[in-house]
Image (cartoon, coloured by chain):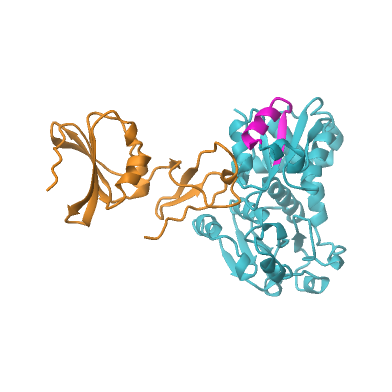
Amino acid sequence: MLNIDSLQTGIVIDHIQAGTSMRIYDLLQLEKLDCCVAVIKNARSSKFGRKDIIKIEGQVSVDLDVLGFIDPNITVNYIENGHIAEKKALKLPKYIKNVISCKNPRCITTIEEGVDQVFQLCDEKTRRYRCIYCEQEYKRPTP
Amino acid sequence: MVKHLIDPLDLSVSEINDLLDLADKISAEPQKYAHLCDGKKLATLFYEPSTRTRLSFETAMLNMGGSVMGFHSAETSSATKGESVADTIRVVSCFADICAMRHPKEGAPRRAAHFSKIPVINAGDGGHQHPTQTLTDLMTIRRKKGRLHDLTIGLCGDLKFGRTVHSLIKSLARYPGIRFVLISPEELRVPGYIIEEVLQPQHIPYEEGTSLEAALPRLDILYMTRVQKERFFNEEDYVRLKDSYVLTSEKMKLAGPEMYVLHPLPRVNEIALDVDDDPRAAYFDQVQNGVYVRQALILKLLGVKLPC
């Protein structure tokens, strides 16, 4: 049994779809943090069977909005004094930057150097995002 | 803050109505506006060949005493050296007071607007948007029908890649009592997002079909479009679809006496030459209206004080 110490202060990103924690690690740029970060893969989950978990130790500022786009099943717990102080409700961010890229071959982002890939939420119900340049809809890969 | 026109929805309905009013005034008394842009420079950054749109912009500026500069294709610009749109507009901002950009890549004018110190006008970006054509279309419809509300608008041809179609639907959808009849081959239907995000949420009546003849008797406006060879990746598909619709004087007999035909031009063969003499053929009026509406737009974006 792998043992990871409980956090006294920090953030637990829980219920990550098994196998996707490293993508989230990269997107949140956690390698830049000067603190202890634990990535737990394939943990047992009563809800999903398997899940990944990321634990970040200490009082750190991480922009977690993008998680709402990646997977609304993810839960985020803020830990203080060894207890859950806050559960963050994930919302779809209005804009997502440099997380996904436009697949429209006619889009300016395919040729322009240095351009950020920015998508705007255009329909909350259907979770649709569009490229801010060409308005092409981002098609989520089928699982 | 610099105001740009990238998407037709950058203008509110009241701003569009003001622009069309101004265009009407310019049309009525062009000499009153002949020197309002003295000393001003328009840059026409055309990365893609265009005859009407570029000449229309240039004529608009020249009509008001301004001057024009620019390039007519990507081959004659620093784009061939790999210069980005962002850098080009930074440079042009130092030379000109306003610019009109035509680009084959969708979103290029929006990219330019992010870096521009001068107003950027989208003069067509790929198969995406063409807002000044839309202003031209709206002006023509208003002049012919006397209103922009309570109309049945037929759009026919390539509704998938037709940027003028997308812009026109988005714009007209904001006026009350508009109904759309969308006529195209199955492969060239209006993109789903126009239906799902523009028409359906606003409960705008529309129907999709393939028969021009069936639609003609019910229309107030017929907006014909060309099947655009340059938007196809596959030549075979283009050849198969290019002659899907041809409006002839014979078919015009099915339409009402006040049903006007518009076309963003250039035409290939989707409107037979014998339709040109029909008083309901309004596509060359559109060209003239395009100059007035672009004059009005340049004046508004430059913030020029208008004559009383």
Q: Quadrant of residue B100?
A: top right
Q: Nearer the viewer, residue B31 or A122?
A: A122
Front-most of residues B173 and B245: B245
Q: Position of residue B285 (x, y in %)?
A: 81, 52
Above or below, A58 relative to B198: above
Chain with colour cyan in the figure: B
Chain in orange on the image: A
- The residue sitting at 65% across, 68% down in the picture is B184
Say whether residue B63 is visible: yes
Q: Is residue B24 visible?
A: no
Q: Decide which of B212, A47 is in the foreground and name it.
A: A47
**Which percent across, then down, holds residue B230?**
70, 57
Classify B127 as above or below B92. below
**Is B198 on the left-hand or right-hand side of B156?**
left
Magenta-drawn stretch contains B91: yes
Q: Name the spot of residue B6 as percent of width and height, x first.
A: 63, 41
The magenta segment is: B83-101
Residue B244, image quadrant: bottom right
